Image (tube, rainbow, N blue to C red):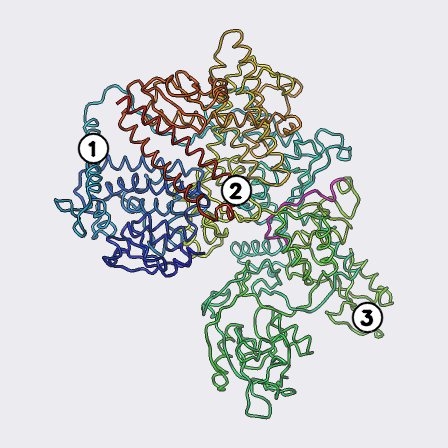
Amino acid sequence: MALISLCQMDTLYISSHPDDFRSLLPLIAAEFCPSPPRIVHEDPPAEVARSRPALVLAGSGGTVLTGANAVSWYLAAAGNRTGSDKKQESQVWQWLSFAENELMPVACAVTFPLLGIMGVDKKLQQSSKAELLRVLKALDETLVLRTFLVGEGVTLADIAVAVAALLPFKYALESADRKSLVNVTRWYNTCVNQTQFLKVLGKISLCEKMVPVTPKPSAAVNATATAASEAATPDGTPANGPPKTEAQLKKEAKKREKMEKFQQKKEMEEKKKMQPQTEKKAKPEKKELDVITYNIPTPPGEKKDVLSPLPDSYSPQYVEAAWYSWWEKQGFFKPEYGRKNVSEPNPRGVFMMCIPPPNVTGSLHLGHALTNAIQDCLTRWHRMRGETTLWNPGCDHAGIATQVVVEKKLMRERKMTRHDLGRGNFIQEVWKWKNEKGDRIYHQLKKLGSSLDWDRACFTMDDKLSYAVQEAFIRMHEEGVIYRSKRLVNWSCTLNSAISDIEVDKKELARRTLLPVPGYKEKVEFGVLVSFSYKVEGSDEEVVVATTRIETMLGDTAVAVHPNDSRYQHLKGKMVVHPFCDRKMPIVFDDFVDMNFGTGAVKITPAHDHNDYEVGERHKLPFINILDENGLLINVPPPFLGMKRFEARKAVLQALKDLGQFKEVKDNPMVVPVCSRSKDIVEPLLKPQWYVDCREMGKQAADVVRNGELKIIPDHHLKTWFNWMDNIRDWCISRQLWWGHRIPAYFVTVNDPSVKPGEDVDGHYWVSGRSEEEAREKAAKRFNVTADKISLRQDEDVLDTWFSSGIFPFSIFGWPTESEDLRVFYPGTLLETGHDILFFWVARMVMMGLKLTGKLPFKEVYLHAVVRDTHGRKMSKSLGNVIDPLDVITGISLEGLHAQLTDSNLDPLEIEKARQGQKSDYPSGIPECGTDALRFALCAYTSQGRDINLDVNRILGYRHFCNKLWNAVKFAMRTLGEGFVPWEKAQLCGSESVSDRWILSRLSAAVALCDSGFQAYDFPAITTAIYNFWLYELCDIYLESVKPVLSRTDSEGQKQADICRQTLYTCLEVGLRLLSPLMPFVTEELFQRLPRRLAQDSTSSICVTPYPETSEFCWHSEDIDCQMEFVMSVVKTIRSLRADYNLTKTRADCYLQCIDSDTAALVQTYGLQIQTLSYSQAIYPVVGGDSTIPQGCAVAIASDKCTVHLMLKGLIDLEKEVTKLTAKKGELEKQMEKMNEKMAKNDYKEKVPVKVQEADAEKLRQNETELQKVNEAIENFRKMM
């Protein structure tokens, strides 16, 4: 908080040209600051600072920060943009250095000639461009699996590197360059489109062609050129400052010398290029992602050929071919697999989950893909655990959405409305469309590898489910839970139907706004508050009221004020007069009025406003409906009668002005309800409808969660659940559509004078029935007349789609008819879905399940996060960010994405906006990633309780993981050899090497992490455990470390190699089984190539092979893990030294100076592993002083227990080595000085926690040990000089 408060009055002095590079960095950082500093575009006062940028800190005794990095760090830290911990802070510093020392110089060298600041030397410019691309390639590789450089959000690292890359992207990096830098380009576009960047930089146009720029170069360029050259007078005095110190002059001389060497090196490279080429082979160009197809004829359902050699590299098209149809034909996805019937007792238990039925109109987007990736992973895991497993597919008839699609198709193709066809023929058209187009979503689910039991697939309009819907309505109606009432509903005039709350979008307006409305040529005004007056009857007094919907005043029946408002006490019992008719309206006193808002008087329109409806009920006011179903005015005086509602808005306003009763109109923030289907403005409208009484059911739904019968995960959704259930309103289930389940209710007319005629809203005159005959019998019995005197009219409306979805968990099993499936699989085990439909679907399933079956439909609810795009925006067709998962799987060009927009229902303006969004996010289209990579990425992103900002390009990184997996298994299979026979059981024989024991320990740890991850729905923990095991532990360490063992030919060596092969096989086989639920295709392909432990397993699939369990793989050893951690710190230190001295091919002897004999013994034990992994000639552990270590070694400290001495045999620059160690010494001394100061404070022991004190003491001890070793090393090198 201190940092933020200081920042509030700080002053930032920057260049008068705000696009100066040195200014851009702090300016953008300041945008992230909670209280940005005051910006001054001039030089700071001489007594304050000598250069810009400079930040004067208020309230700190005149402290001044100068230099772009220092100023930016301070500002970014105030906005929490310098990393969340010490590690991230260090990474941010590294990127600042990268931007300043590596990227900025080559960026200037390439762009300055284009901008006329330097002379153009084409050869030099070409070599500089090559160097720029090399630097950016390194950055590109870093960004393969990252959205931002450090952490999961924008940090100062991103700001600095993006600013350094600004000129290249604007002037030098052409489209082809950007295509080769897909990750950098994606990251750069993400950064510069952040709000904070846009405020400083504006919209950035990317380079089309690298040519000299004719406009006057920007101040940024001039300023940077000045900064780069540091123009000085001959005596070394800067043009605008005091003489420089000797140290500064030396530093500048070194800089000039380095620059001259750099230029000489470039010139030499150019000369070499000009010389005649020898016969040396040219380097092949980097290959694009391999596309290999599976071309062996395999009839659908037959097993794929697994005898042919594996292709050289991983290709999704090859791997994913043929497997799904074989899985399906073999019945692996059916709960009956491996047992006589589903009723057969299974000690492992039953797992049942039904799919959230997607709309038949739709095609899957990445949100659906996330849902299905999670559900399929869970299903495959339970299946591999041996449980009787069913994941039941289904599809929703999507009443409104489907009807709208078919109506548009009719109008487009035949110029007809549904009314032209009639109800029966229109419904036939919908069925025809469904049968032609409705299976696209099933095709997509299969492409995703979803292991659903397709024989049990259900459609909510199927006869079985329709019968269940009818039965549910009749039972609830007969019990009185469903009743008839006339209330306000959300009405869409375009659809001519009531719509549910989830189909109403809330559009927030800050001020007066013109919005397009269907059926109106001109846009309609919203976001204003109109004030007008009502005259008090029998006096000259008036009451002023205000409204955002002035046309509704035609339906006003009262004015309300607060009972305690002294301004209106004298008007009790008085009436006001409506200006356009003879209606007299009471002034009512009601607590709902806010007497501090406006005049404290409110107009009341009970038939067209939800709050006013309740006031009307309390005060028994008339309800005057002024709108028909099409939005035309009714029950109003001329000239307003028959007008369209928003044309009446203008007419009423003018009429009030003419009468002198208009007061004012002003901007007013408001929320406008918009129909998500038709984009029409939703109107509250009084309609007789069917309602479900939810009070008792809502209480039950809340109670089962409170008492633990139903578990909702993650539990932060409980507050929302209880808020909804404890305050639930009755549910309107009528929809004025033709497509859907027609309500099985009949209005009764009795042809007998003794029975008075009924009204539509009177529930006594409505009966429900499974047929008209049954309804007639019920009516005759109710009114005590013969059946022939009964006339029936079935309700024209259909049921809300959520009604049929609410009984989906048991209607799919044939409820109310008893069946084996209903008995075994209901209640289900789990419901997995997005948290955005917690109320609309989950709550209704719980309520209706308890009401109709007396049982909960499932025991647990797991709610995943909502998928957003990489910028955190909701997926929307109009933004162009809705992505078909199939496009990620197979890849698609930018042109292909544009073509999809052309085929959509968007208007031309929205299409252009969406095209721009696609061009920005996917400038090169979407590369082919494959199903496995997509699934793995989605699971890796999933975290409980957070929205997911999904970067499609990042998925490509997991395709590269598939390729590494592929290559590792290919190498390992060659290593195993053709005659390899695995042991019948994975077990330890007691003769394993330390490498074997370590990798089996890590395998056991991965098994435990996956098991606990699946139990807790912690998918990132699962993906991290598997990724780390395969990539870093098995491939990078184990496979490399055992190569010498596998190449031994002596008898003892052969025995050790055989044990090593058994260990390797165990790792492959178990590792593939761990990965199978997440990556079913590639794991099946590779698993089928492995030999089996038992011959009878030869035909089985990995998807029905047991999932590894901790009871079997119980070899985890923390001691071995700690030992290998130490070994790898030594290996990394040796590798770092080798890299420092460019020892790429030469092997060197390595002396490891150990602090004690235990450490030396550990080095001895792991000597072969250290030698192999560090590419050393030999490893010599040494205990004690340096006397036994030959002179001529490079020295590096691996830890406080071990120092590495690498024999360089005269290849080393001794002076350089001493300089490095002296710098290290200074760094350690600074750290120790700070630590000693901290620990010497008077209140240190009282205020600092004991654990922190212990950690400080340990850190100080380590630093002291390291400092001692550094001093010894410096002394050693000085002896050699």
Residue 1074 shown left or right of residue 104 in the figure: right
- State which tag comes first along the sequence, 3 or 2: 3
Question: In the image, what residue occupies the spot 49% across and 8% down?
Answer: 1049
The residue pinned by badge 3 equals 751
Residue 568 colored in magenta in the image: no
- State which tag comes first along the sequence, 3 or 1: 1
Front-most of 641 and 752? 641
Question: In the image, what residue occupies the spot 54% across and 38% down?
Answer: 935
> Amino acid under label 2?
Tyr
> Amino acid under label 3?
Asn
Residue 826 colored in magenta in the image: yes
Q: How many marks?
A: 3
Crowd class of label 1 (few under 14; some 14 to 19; many from 20; radius 10 Å): few
The residue pinned by badge 1 equals 261
Residue 464 seen from this side:
no
The residue pinned by badge 2 equals 941
Image quadrant in which the C terminus is located: top left
Give the foreground label among 1 and 2.
1
> Amino acid under label 1?
Lys
C-alpha span from label 1 to label 2: 47 Å
Provide residue 140's location: percent of width, then percent of height.
Answer: 38, 37
